[in-house]
Amino acid sequence: MAGNAQEAGPFNLLRPLLLMSYSAYYLIPTIIELILSFNFKPFFSFDDFKDAWFARFWVFFGPRSRENAAPKVMPLLQNSARGVCLDIGPGSGQWLYLFARANNKDITKIYGVEPNRGMHKALRENAVAAGLSDVYEIIGCGAEELSTKGGIQPNSIDTIITVQCLCSIPTPQRIIKELYPLLKPGGRWLVYEHVRTKYTGDFVETWQAALNHIWPHFFNGCDIRRPTDEWLLQAGDWEEVKLRPGEGEGKYDTVPHVIGTLTKKK
């Protein structure tokens, strides 16, 4: 149950440094892979290089991140999505097994909005493995381009899914407001996201702010200080809000989460 897990101690403040070291390890292999494949374009664009770097790193780290977060995310996602779903920033598709057709017969369509094309191969493979090949469609644009390039119409989505993605998309507050109208009345938004710490005045607030200057470079633009939960509440009229802090997270968590659901007013 949420809130029953024991909070981590002060050494947990060092955990982000360990995670960044994992990412840094993949710098050299990424460079070697690009050279051997004669793909020199990323060397002339820092953004393209970071995409290639993160894509290679995430193939390794994504499944391990999933294993760590699964006990918290599974109760939220498993059998909770229905109808037409909008899966924002699915990455390599590490959570798609939770939407397997065998266990989610109410899903009729899933649009996977993933701008990093380096992730698409693994994303397609995971969709096939989950038995979703006939309903999962990858949209290779950013969430901010859904209305223009994605062809998603207002009031057409039954379920929006955002799992650790709103921390890294551009202009998140604006995008959250643009996603809200896509939900049908009564539609649900499933959320598991990094948020700014609530322990203002404690050391963790200063530590989080300091780390956030370098963390985004190792995690493809991820910003761990966004008040995403507050922006979601402000996005529109909600009939029901069930948001809570990540299980067992407290004043020594530099990368805290919010988890839960929001149901659009009918």
Image: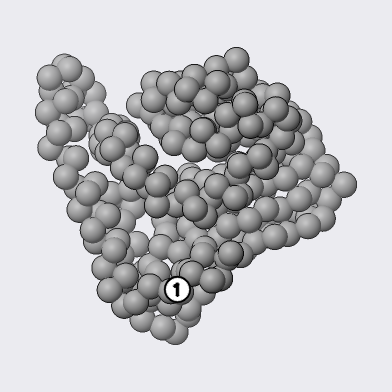
Q: Quadrant of residue 84?
A: top right
- Does residue 237 appear to the left or right of 128 in the view shown? right
Q: Quadrant of residue 125?
A: top left
- Does residue 199 appear to the left or right of 234 in the view shown? left
Residue at position x 78%, y 57% from top? Answer: 240
* Of 192 and 96, the residue lying toward us: 96
Determine if residue 31 is in view. yes
User: Horizontal and vertical percent for residue 251?
Assistant: 43, 77
- The residue indicated by pointer 1 is 6
Residue type at numbered disc 1: Gln
* Of 149 and 240, the residue lying toward us: 240
User: Horizontal and vertical percent for residue 166?
Assistant: 51, 48
User: Horizontal and vertical percent for residue 152?
Assistant: 68, 27
- Does residue 24 appear to the left or right of 118 in the view shown? left
User: Horizontal and vertical percent for residue 264?
Assistant: 78, 49
Element type at marker 1?
loop
* Of 73 and 84, the residue lying toward us: 73
What colour scheme was applied to this rendering of the protein?
one colour
Q: Residues within 10 Å of mark 1 (few under 14, many from 20)?
A: few
Q: Quadrant of residue 33?
A: top left
Determine if residue 54 is in view. no
Residue at position x 66%, y 39% from top? Answer: 79
* Of 172 and 159, the residue lying toward us: 159
Q: Looking at the picture, does residue 120 appear above or below residue 80? A: above
Quadrant including the N terminus: bottom right
Residue at position x 23%, y 23% from top? Answer: 41
